[in-house]
Amino acid sequence: MKDIMTAPFVEEMKKTTANMYRLGWDERNGGNISYMLEEDEVKEYLDLDKVIRTISTGFDATDLIGKIFIVTGTGKYFKNVESDPETNLGIIRIAKDGTTAELLWGYKDGGKFTSELPAHLMSHMARLKVDPENRVVMHSHPTHTLAMNYVHELDEKKFTHTLWEMCTECIVVFPDGVGVLPWMLCGTNEIGEATAKKMEYFRLVVWGMHGIYGAGKTMDETFGLIETVEKAAEIFMLTAHLPRINTIKDEEMVELAEFFGVNYRKDFLNI
Ligand code: 13P
Ligand code: ZN
């Protein structure tokens, strides 16, 4: 059996959480990540017959029975993952009943998965229906995205359009746009269900006055989606109080989308 501390997926979780912390997106225990792993890669590092303990999830994830995820722990700080992955992360498998998580590794101090597991697993289920290669769901509190929530209408067409105007490559990176939810109580099945509903159409979902969710095939893709929104939101916040002299026009966005061959939300443009 190989040493799990050398596993590429643990390494990716360490690197990503450290990056997000240093970018200031994930203060204290803010943010969480779930990453679906292949059974074949996990069994090189863990005895899959050895369940440390079982933890009830409180919702039905029948579509994910037998699937294995590495997930950040609830109340755990992204800043500490790098130095102590075994306490701050856990590897869980969805049990045959669809509502129990079998702990295979981690949460060493008796902890458990993020309180946002409903939003994560429900989003995995929704994205896998659209894209069978989806593997990652990421939640974060990026500063400028959050700031923008207080001064911009929380309307997904208007919000996406403003972001697309802020960086030339935005429409190419997230042509499907950004879904937006109003402020809702976090950590609940209700916000999980609402997020998953948006994930049927979007890989990015803003939680009003809270943060953002991203979903993708890889850690890089998912991180890159949130990073691009955050960059656009930063440009918006740096310029929102100044007279706007120039902008990227809708016709130019069409030119970009067509040149890069992306399928964009035409109804989010004003032409
Ligand atoms: P957890 O510590 O449970 O992951 O919660 C952090 C968070 O961002 C809640 O939305
Ligand atoms: Zn949060």
Image: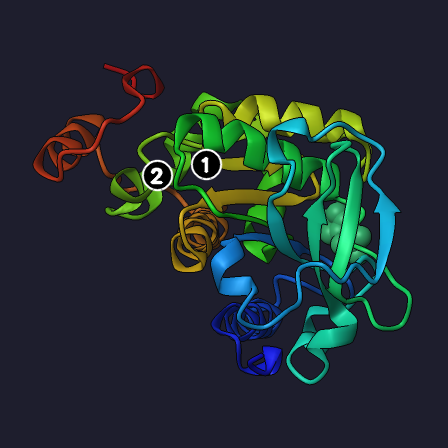
Check disc 2 and report the residue beneath it.
Answer: 174
Q: Nearer the viewer, residue 136 or 26?
A: 136
Q: Nearer the viewer, residue 54 or 236?
A: 54
Furthest toward the right, the residue is 110
Residue 145 appears anywhere in the view = yes
Label 2 to label 1: alpha-carbon separation:
8 Å
Q: Residue at x 61, y 61 (%)?
A: 25
Indicate the amino acid at tag 1. Arg
Residue 246 appears anywhere in the view = no
Q: Quadrant of residue 73?
A: bottom right
Task: Count all numbered tags in the image, as a single digit.
Answer: 2
Q: Earlier in the sequence, mark 2 or mark 1?
A: 2
Q: Residue at x 78, y 32 (%)?
A: 97
Residue 261, percent across and down? 13, 34
Q: Which mark is residue 55?
A: none
| In contact (CB < 8 Å): disc 2 and disc 1 | yes
Residue 10, percent across and down? 57, 72
Residue 204, percent across and down? 49, 38
Left or right: 267 with respect to 86?
left
Position of residue 165 relative to residue 251, above or below, is: below
Left or right: 46 with respect to 249?
right
Q: Secondary structure at mark 2?
A: loop
Q: Nearer the viewer, residue 128 or 190?
A: 128
Residue 32, percent across and down? 67, 55
Check disc 1 and report the residue beneath it.
Answer: 203
Is ligand 2 less than 8 Å from the beta carbon at label 2? no
Indicate the amino acid at tag 2. Phe
Is ligand 2 less than 8 Å from the beta carbon at label 1? no
- Image depth: mark 2 or mark 1 in front: 1
Q: Secondary structure at mark 1?
A: loop
